[in-house]
Amino acid sequence: MRETAVKLHNSFSPAHSRAINRHMLPFCSVEEILRLHGPLISNRRTAVRPVVIGGRRIEAGERMTVIWTSANRDARAFEAADRYCPERDQGPNLLYGAGIHICPGAALARMQLRVMIDELRSAIRPFSVLTGTEPFRAVYPASGFASVFLQIAL
Protein backbone atom coordinates (compact mmCIF):
# COMPACT_ATOMS: atom_id res chain seq x y z
CA MET A 1 0.00 0.00 0.00
CA ARG A 2 2.93 2.34 0.54
CA GLU A 3 4.57 1.78 -2.84
CA THR A 4 3.38 5.01 -4.50
CA ALA A 5 4.60 7.21 -1.65
CA VAL A 6 7.90 5.32 -1.60
CA LYS A 7 8.31 5.74 -5.37
CA LEU A 8 7.50 9.43 -5.15
CA HIS A 9 9.95 9.78 -2.26
CA ASN A 10 12.65 7.93 -4.21
CA SER A 11 12.18 10.25 -7.16
CA PHE A 12 13.47 13.08 -4.95
CA SER A 13 16.74 11.33 -4.10
CA PRO A 14 20.07 13.11 -4.65
CA ALA A 15 21.15 10.28 -6.98
CA HIS A 16 18.23 10.98 -9.31
CA SER A 17 18.89 14.72 -9.13
CA ARG A 18 22.48 14.15 -10.27
CA ALA A 19 21.55 11.57 -12.89
CA ILE A 20 18.77 13.50 -14.61
CA ASN A 21 18.43 17.15 -15.55
CA ARG A 22 16.50 18.91 -12.75
CA HIS A 23 13.77 20.03 -15.15
CA MET A 24 13.31 16.55 -16.62
CA LEU A 25 13.02 14.72 -13.29
CA PRO A 26 9.46 15.81 -12.54
CA PHE A 27 8.35 14.85 -16.07
CA CYS A 28 10.08 11.44 -15.96
CA SER A 29 8.82 10.72 -12.45
CA VAL A 30 5.24 11.70 -13.28
CA GLU A 31 5.14 9.54 -16.40
CA GLU A 32 6.59 6.51 -14.63
CA ILE A 33 4.47 6.84 -11.49
CA LEU A 34 1.35 7.18 -13.63
CA ARG A 35 2.39 4.24 -15.82
CA LEU A 36 2.57 2.06 -12.72
CA HIS A 37 -0.33 3.63 -10.82
CA GLY A 38 -2.61 5.23 -13.38
CA PRO A 39 -5.72 7.07 -12.17
CA LEU A 40 -8.10 4.90 -14.21
CA ILE A 41 -8.13 1.09 -14.20
CA SER A 42 -10.17 0.45 -17.34
CA ASN A 43 -12.44 1.76 -20.10
CA ARG A 44 -15.00 0.05 -22.28
CA ARG A 45 -14.86 0.16 -26.06
CA THR A 46 -17.00 -1.06 -28.96
CA ALA A 47 -15.17 -2.25 -32.08
CA VAL A 48 -16.20 -0.25 -35.15
CA ARG A 49 -14.65 -2.76 -37.57
CA PRO A 50 -13.19 -6.28 -37.37
CA VAL A 51 -9.70 -6.35 -35.86
CA VAL A 52 -7.23 -8.86 -34.43
CA ILE A 53 -5.65 -7.93 -31.09
CA GLY A 54 -3.19 -10.25 -29.41
CA GLY A 55 -4.17 -13.08 -31.75
CA ARG A 56 -7.89 -12.76 -30.94
CA ARG A 57 -10.37 -11.68 -33.62
CA ILE A 58 -12.84 -9.02 -32.50
CA GLU A 59 -15.86 -8.38 -34.71
CA ALA A 60 -17.47 -5.01 -35.44
CA GLY A 61 -19.98 -4.19 -32.70
CA GLU A 62 -18.26 -6.41 -30.14
CA ARG A 63 -17.72 -4.81 -26.74
CA MET A 64 -14.51 -5.09 -24.78
CA THR A 65 -12.85 -3.71 -21.69
CA VAL A 66 -9.39 -2.18 -21.96
CA ILE A 67 -7.43 -2.73 -18.74
CA TRP A 68 -4.94 0.17 -18.72
CA THR A 69 -3.16 -1.03 -15.59
CA SER A 70 -2.34 -4.31 -17.33
CA ALA A 71 -1.37 -2.72 -20.65
CA ASN A 72 1.12 -0.40 -18.95
CA ARG A 73 2.79 -3.36 -17.21
CA ASP A 74 3.14 -5.47 -20.36
CA ALA A 75 6.64 -6.97 -20.45
CA ARG A 76 6.53 -6.87 -24.27
CA ALA A 77 6.32 -3.06 -24.11
CA PHE A 78 8.35 -2.31 -20.96
CA GLU A 79 11.49 -4.10 -19.79
CA ALA A 80 11.13 -4.98 -16.07
CA ALA A 81 7.58 -3.65 -16.39
CA ASP A 82 6.74 -3.82 -12.66
CA ARG A 83 9.86 -1.88 -11.64
CA TYR A 84 9.86 1.91 -11.10
CA CYS A 85 12.35 3.40 -13.56
CA PRO A 86 11.75 7.09 -14.39
CA GLU A 87 14.49 7.06 -17.05
CA ARG A 88 12.70 4.47 -19.24
CA ASP A 89 11.18 5.26 -22.65
CA GLN A 90 7.53 6.17 -22.06
CA GLY A 91 6.60 5.84 -25.75
CA PRO A 92 4.42 2.73 -25.22
CA ASN A 93 2.65 4.27 -22.17
CA LEU A 94 -1.12 4.12 -22.78
CA LEU A 95 -2.12 6.07 -19.68
CA TYR A 96 -3.97 8.78 -21.58
CA GLY A 97 -5.11 6.61 -24.48
CA ALA A 98 -4.24 7.07 -28.15
CA GLY A 99 -5.77 8.10 -31.45
CA ILE A 100 -9.36 9.37 -31.32
CA HIS A 101 -9.59 8.23 -27.70
CA ILE A 102 -6.64 10.26 -26.40
CA CYS A 103 -7.53 12.23 -23.27
CA PRO A 104 -8.02 15.91 -24.14
CA GLY A 105 -6.82 16.88 -20.65
CA ALA A 106 -3.56 14.88 -20.79
CA ALA A 107 -1.26 17.88 -21.26
CA LEU A 108 -2.94 19.79 -18.44
CA ALA A 109 -2.80 16.79 -16.08
CA ARG A 110 0.90 16.23 -16.82
CA MET A 111 1.69 19.90 -16.28
CA GLN A 112 -0.18 20.00 -12.95
CA LEU A 113 1.60 16.89 -11.69
CA ARG A 114 5.04 18.14 -12.81
CA VAL A 115 4.47 21.49 -11.08
CA MET A 116 3.30 19.73 -7.91
CA ILE A 117 6.38 17.49 -7.81
CA ASP A 118 8.73 20.37 -8.57
CA GLU A 119 7.16 22.47 -5.81
CA LEU A 120 7.38 19.57 -3.36
CA ARG A 121 11.04 19.09 -4.24
CA SER A 122 11.87 22.73 -3.59
CA ALA A 123 9.55 23.45 -0.66
CA ILE A 124 9.58 20.53 1.73
CA ARG A 125 11.99 18.37 3.59
CA PRO A 126 12.11 14.57 3.53
CA PHE A 127 8.78 12.83 4.03
CA SER A 128 7.45 9.34 4.64
CA VAL A 129 4.12 7.60 5.11
CA LEU A 130 2.95 8.40 8.63
CA THR A 131 3.68 5.51 10.98
CA GLY A 132 0.57 3.62 12.03
CA THR A 133 -1.48 4.71 9.02
CA GLU A 134 -2.36 2.98 5.81
CA PRO A 135 -3.15 4.77 2.55
CA PHE A 136 -6.80 4.51 1.46
CA ARG A 137 -7.21 3.01 -2.00
CA ALA A 138 -9.48 4.74 -4.48
CA VAL A 139 -12.74 3.06 -5.52
CA TYR A 140 -13.08 1.32 -8.93
CA PRO A 141 -12.92 2.44 -11.73
CA ALA A 142 -10.44 4.88 -10.21
CA SER A 143 -7.02 3.58 -9.27
CA GLY A 144 -4.32 4.64 -6.87
CA PHE A 145 -5.08 6.20 -3.54
CA ALA A 146 -7.85 8.44 -2.24
CA SER A 147 -5.55 9.61 0.56
CA VAL A 148 -2.06 9.01 1.92
CA PHE A 149 -1.00 10.39 5.29
CA LEU A 150 2.52 11.81 5.13
CA GLN A 151 4.94 12.83 7.84
CA ILE A 152 7.10 15.77 6.76
CA ALA A 153 10.39 16.42 8.56
CA LEU A 154 10.64 19.79 10.31
Image (cartoon, grey):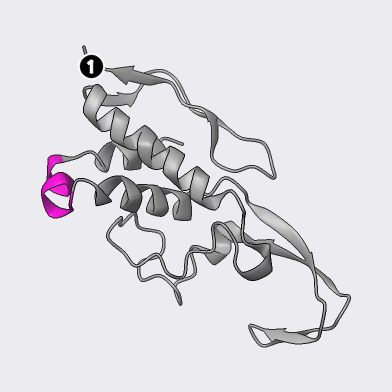
Q: Which residue is mark 1?
A: 153
* In this picture, residue 58 sits left or right of residue 117: right
Q: Is residue 105 above or below residue 129?
A: below
Q: State the residue lying farthest toward the top.
A: 154
* Quadrant of res 86: bottom left
Instruction: Please report the residue visible at 41 percent of the width from the left and 18 percent of the height from the top.
Output: 132
Q: Which residues are magenta?
A: 14-21
* Quadrant of res 42: bottom right
Is residue 139 or residue 100 the one in the foreground? 100
Which x, y percent locates residue 51? 74, 86
Q: Is residue 128 above or below residue 21?
A: above
Q: State the residue lying farthest toward the right.
A: 61
Instruction: Please report the residue visible at 84 percent of the width from the left and 83 percent of the height from the top.
Output: 59
Q: Main secondary structure of the magenta part?
A: helix
Tell me the element at label 1.
loop
Q: Is residue 122 above or below residue 15?
A: above
Instruction: Please report the residue visible at 54 percent of the width from the left and 57 percent of the height from the top.
Output: 95
Q: Is residue 111 above or below residue 60?
A: above
Is residue 46 or residue 127 the one in the foreground? 46
Question: In the rendered view of the protein, which quadrant contains the C terminus?
Answer: top left
* In this picture, residue 49 sits left or right of residue 125: right
* Quadrant of res 123: top left
Which x, y percent locates residue 101? 67, 63
Which x, y percent locates residue 108? 51, 45
